[in-house]
Amino acid sequence: MTREMTGAEMVIQAMADQGVKHLFGYPGGAVLPIYDAIFAQKEVQHILVRHEQGAVHAAEGYARSTGKVGCVLVTSGPGATNAVTGLTDALCDSIPIVCITGQVPTHLIGNDAFQECDTVGITRPCTKHNYLVKRIEDLPRILHEAFHIASTGRPGPVVVDIPKDIQFAKGVYSKPKEFPHTGYKPRLKGDLEAIKAAIELMAHAKRPLFYTGGGVINSGKHASALLGELVKLTGFPITSTLMGLGAYPAADPQWMGMLGMHGTLEANMAMHDCDVMVCIGARFDDRITGRIDAFSPGSKKIHVDIDASSINKNVKVDIPIVGDCAHVLEDMVRLWRSTAKQPDKKALGDWWKQIGKWRDRKSLAYRASNEVIKPQYAIQRLYEMTKDKDVYITTEVGQHQMWAAQFFHFQEPNRWMTSGGLGTMGYGLPASVGVQLAHPKSLVIDIAGEASVQMTMQELSTAVQYRLPIKIFILNNGYMGMVRQWQELLHGSRYSESYSEALPDFVKLADAMHAVGIRCEKPGDLDHAIKEMINVDRPVLFDCIVDKTENCFPMIPSGKAHNEMILGDSGVSLDDAITEEGKMLV
Amino acid sequence: MNANVPSSTSHYPTAPTAQTDVTHTLSVLVDNEPGVLARVIGLFSGRGYNIESLTVSETEHAKHLSLITVVTTGTPMVIEQIKNQLDRLVPVHRVVDMTLSGRSIERELAMVKVRGKGDNRVEALRLADAFRARVIDATTESFVFEITGKSDKIEQFVALMLPLGLVEVSRTGIAAIARGPEGM
């Protein structure tokens, strides 16, 4: 449709034309015309957050659980700078976000006006792309281009900075049919010759594995289905990064669990000892590789990624394939079916036997207790009591996040929302707000730590305002647990500033914020308390008091290789059990 | 299973052992829009890449295209990264590695101010002639020479001017173009 309207109306019209239902934002002087436009319509519902960082995280949760673009609206100056953490988080985890920022009127830009900041300058390194709109004529194109860039290729956040006079200005709005940025053409299909070479390599593998990541999830549900098909066809074992959990069902016997710093022994040992590694939509991040020069030394590596700059960045690979996971997986499945070659059954059988031996060491085992709630036990119970429900999990960052990744099992993509790349404490609560909004009937749980959750605690008010019955499941150990763990293992147990001093009474806090508070301190009471939490149709702050000094194992210590993991003290450790002294030193 | 003392107490892996650095000249065709240079330079500074030389100018006014020529150093893996990272920027149309193609011509222009009297002045003028540098400004006690060529030629000329009263040098940085009939 083409008609004359103000810039502010164009913003909302473009969102409506893009199918946006919810917009997370916070008003301020430089976006008031847009708030006027919001007031005048019903298509796009505005969700008022309590802090702009929360708006972006909520939009991220919304985007990750639906596969759609998450939308944010914030004002100039502090509104924009508060959004920076969320934007960086979305960039690191490749989440499609369109963030509209207000700006001071064009004639005041550069004058240090009230609530002015160089938004495009500040957000340039933390967005996939950004715009400062200087002419009303450009606005319709830029708005739609922002959605296009955010959602295609490797997804990411896009900022559109709109000065207030442009919001008031009138212009002709129409939805453009094409994009003039000829430089931006994400490559979807992988090079067929490279894919053929990859299939050939896989067909001759003796100790192969799949190592997959968030790229599979970003590529859509179809990509996950194709991945499942390829894994079944080949009979290879599969592991995934933190970001990729859910792309392959955890209940399947070919699933080895998460890999990396706190991954399972079997996944990491298999990474180290494999002869063919098929990496799909993951990026050889330092949490995955450990010591680069000792990373999977004997393997040929295939790397499928839509972003050419992810290939050969950290690890040199043998067969790079630039393309969208779903497209490449489709070709792989087709070629695998059409080739008569089958992998060496005997070798694959021996490989699975070896993996079985690693599995038998039960690297996730922990010492159970009847006295205190072990955090791992809490996640296990939470999983058992919710696994048959329509459940979505978000997390904050730290030990609880790793335990959630280890003990909560996902059978489907888009069910797991966590801050992987940036590691943003305070991500989970606002993210769960976005998830719940997108899935009003589902059970949405933020697995949290008592330290992380305080970073964006105020968003509980948002949940209450919109009657979003999110469950905030706090593993409260009274410490910044991961910091404490590192201080114990690497800094001689000098717990400098990692104790959560002066904690609020979370039950009373919930009450004061018109939510429901539940506290649980004994393992015997846990099931009942979780049931109570699930059955409440209101936001819940669940204060689960857990063992204060539990560490997250297994763990690849600093500067070590995959085959040098340390295990928890109740696990059967490899070779020589680590000494108490060694544990202190590592 | 391992009780060794780690080499560092950081939770990041240690830096990989150094490969030798190589120098590459990259031609980057970009949309001539506000902020595009900031994106390119921000990429270099943000990711810790080196810029040895940088020239920017609009090349096709009608198409709003500019050409950035950047000379950078790094390991072969880093050079590949730089090209891929540049290519990822939305306003970047194309990145061509002029060094890799092996058929590029690189030129630089410098203006060199020399102050002196007597023999030094004569000698400066004589050397300028040998280097095919032109005099573009003169006073009774100074010259400004304009010299064009490869960077090492300019550096040699500047070095020779130093004892003869070199005042200052202004260089454009390197511009590059491929030999033969093909365009970018």
Image (cartoon, coloured by chain):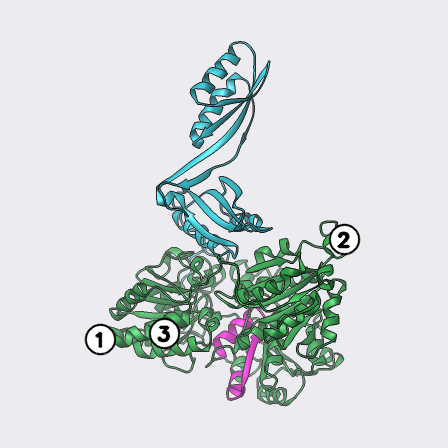
Chain colours: A green, B cyan
Please identify the quarter of the rendering in which residue A346 is found. bottom left
- Name the disc covering residue A140, or none: none
Q: Earlier in the sequence, mark 3 or mark 2?
A: 2
A281 sits left or right of A512 in the view: left
Residue A394 on the magenta segment: yes
Q: Mark 2 = which residue? A: A113
On the image, the x and y values in percent for residue A481 come to 58, 68
Vertical arrangement, residue A375 with respect to residue A170, above or below: below
Residue A224 on the magenta segment: no
Q: Which chain letter matches label 2?
A: A
- What are the residue bounds of the magenta stretch? A383-408
Same chain for the residues under marks 1 and 2 in the image: yes
Q: Amino acid at mark 3?
A: Glu
Q: Amino acid at mark 2?
A: Ala
Residue placed most toward the observer, B174 or A285 = B174
Please identify the quarter of the rendering in which residue A283 is found. bottom left
Q: Is residue B62 visible?
A: yes
Q: Residues within 10 Å of mark 2 (few under 14, many from 20)?
A: few
Q: Secondary structure at mark 2?
A: loop
On the image, the x and y values in percent for residue A472 come to 63, 78
Q: Earlier in the sequence, mark 1 or mark 2?
A: 2
- Name the disc covering residue A340, or none: 1
Residue placed most toward the observer, A39 or A432 = A39
On the image, the x and y values in percent for residue A8 come to 70, 67
- Name the disc covering residue A330, or none: 3
